[in-house]
Image: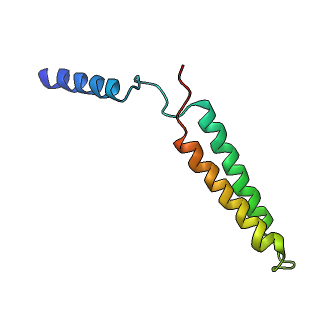
Amino acid sequence: MALQQSKTTASKTQAQANNVTPGQFIFGKDNYLWLIISIAVVAFGFVLMSGTTDIYSTTKIVIAPIVVLAGFGLGFYAILKKPAAK
């Protein structure tokens, strides 16, 4: 019984220390929106990179990799952005 109570107290203390209430998501709506946008940008970059005609075009060797890297950058931003306080 005491072990059960100490586990419950420990989990509550940990939740209070992290400033997160139980049942609350770590990311906010904005984080998920930015993450979806970043996935779309990366997918668009790969679409630009695909195809079999003219494999040495500027679009495929310069623009598409820049678009993919920008999408990964947006993904990092989405993860690291602090959610808005309520």
Q: Quadrant of residue 65?
A: bottom right
Residue at the spot x=80%, y=64% of the render?
48
Q: Is residue 81 left or right of residue 18?
A: right
Between 22 and 65, the one nearer to me in the picture: 65
Image quadrant holding the N terminus, namely top left
Q: Is residue 51 visible?
A: no
Residue 53 in the image: state x and y as whole percent: 87, 78
Residue 19 vs 47, above or below: the answer is above
Residue at the spot x=40%, y=24% of the render?
22
Q: Quadrant of residue 56?
A: bottom right
Q: Is residue 29 left or right of residue 12?
A: right
Residue 46 in the image: state x and y as whole percent: 73, 63
Residue 75 vs 3, above or below: the answer is below
Residue 16 in the image: state x and y as whole percent: 33, 23
Image quadrant holding the C terminus, namely top right
Q: Is residue 31 visible?
A: yes
Residue at the spot x=56%, y=27% of the render?
84
Q: Is residue 84 left or right of residue 12?
A: right
Residue 69 vs 50, above or below: the answer is above
Between 51 and 68, the one nearer to me in the picture: 68
